[in-house]
Amino acid sequence: MTHEHIIRQAILFADALEPLEKVGGLSILKRNILSLARTGISEVFVVHSSDSLMETALSDVDLVESEIQIEAVITDIPGQLKGETLTNLQEKLDEHVLLLRCQHIWDVQALTSVTTQNPSSKLVMVVDSQDRELGEPLPGYLRVQLDDQEVSGLNGAVADAIDTGLWLVPTALLGELATGYDEDLSFAGLDSLVETENVCIAEFAGEYWHFVGTTTSMRRAERALLISLTKPTDGPVVRHISRRVSRLVTNVLMNTNATPNQVTLLSTMVGVLGVILIFQATWSYLILGATVLELQHMLDCCDGELARLKFKGSAIGEWMDTIADGLLNMGYALALGWFCKEMFDTTFYWHLALASVAGYALYDGVVYGQLFFVHRRGSGIHFRWWFQKKDLYIKNSLDGGSPLSRIFGAAHALTRREVFLWGFLGLAILHLPHIAVIWYAVLAAGHASITATHVLAGGMRRAA
């Protein structure tokens, strides 16, 4: 779904904390700027009282990477934000501007819902009424009291106050909003806007909203970010096993200079090692190779997690990951077939493996072609079969409520790579690798059949 980005400017107040403090491997300032860039914001005014600190903080933001124009606005009163700052910016601003503080990190989807809504003539105060652990009392303007969805007070120390910090402001109201500041950096002018009923409430509609104004809250937000790194296509095995391990690795990698593409290369090399071990055709190497391949799958989850966590996703990275998975799948089949040929002294399983590779080559060729020519993306998550709706993943399409859809959903689960790898490991331990070869051949035949049907049904044309 495409969005019309009505709001293109944001004012980001970074004076409330050290902008270089990191959450999830990125400075809070950089995470906020990159989140804004993903919503379609094209110009950000970053306000801070330290010229040298702001220069260091902004040097951490790659303007080419973020595709956003950044202007530093330095105030000369340490610890306070002059009301003149907002007033002086008015001539540079459109009719509406997004105003937020660097004391939160936001779900990009939620920010997009704010920047694409029809602006109001009032100040829209976005609030989060969910029961979240905010910690110690905060300055008053960060929490509000509501009475029947109307602002009744501004007091961060009140237990039932609701978190805010994200405002959509008509530029015409900036002058009144900027009148006077008290010692805790609260907008005194906001009281006046509340009294004149120039403030309305919008409920936050995103997956996450995390306060990061204290060290404790930063670590809590970091844990929540890691937990959020799932994908809509994740099956039960990935959600409950693979992600638990991969997040531990990502937790370490996020504070290094490792890139998602480097992780993809590493996981691919681990997978190649597993395939080579199986080709040695001994029972001990078979079990070791199966174990290495399972570890490769868990490591393979890390590149995407790191990309989503640090906004490092790229077209090259998507294609690297997709093609590497396809090649390794074929390598698994060949290695298993060769092992069974050597151990059971029959060429049947080797020929079956070759047929499996042919089936998967057909499948990969069509998928890669449609991804490249139609979807213009490299990740298989964007591929759509002829029977799928454009906004539904294959998992959602098959997880319906009818008995038939449940049967197809269960059958689809058996085709998932992570399920096969665990099954392969179990069969290796039980000395039943030929069952894995047959399983793989059935999967390849199924993929080849549905691929041929997709082509004959005009699936590539429908997807366009």
Image (tube, rainbow, N blue to C red):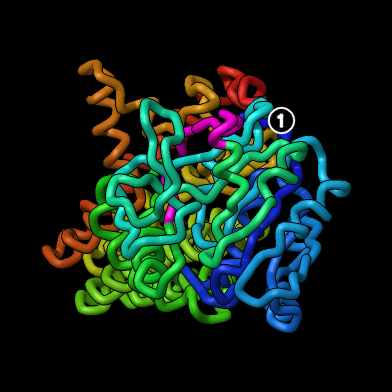
Nearest the viewer among 316 and 164 is 164
Residue 218 point in image, percent of width and height = 41, 69
Residue 224 point in image, percent of width and height = 36, 59
The quadrant in which the C terminus is found is top right
- Helix, strand or loop status at disc 1: loop
Nearest the viewer among 451 and 195 is 195
Q: Which residue type does callout 1 highlight?
A: Glu
Residue visible at 52% across and 57% down? 308
Nearest the viewer among 154 and 399 is 154
> Is residue 425 on the magenta stretch?
no
Which residues are drawn in magenta?
194-210
Q: Which residue is mark 1?
A: 4
Residue visible at 46% across and 50% down? 357
Q: Is residue 215 above or below residue 423?
A: below
Q: Residue furthest left?
A: 430
Residue 310 point in image, percent of width and height = 55, 64
Can residue 365 be seen in the rendering of this structure? no
Residue 114 point in image, percent of width and height = 59, 37
Can residue 230 be seen in the rendering of this structure? yes
> Is residue 201 on the magenta stretch?
yes
Q: Is residue 237 above or below residue 462?
A: below
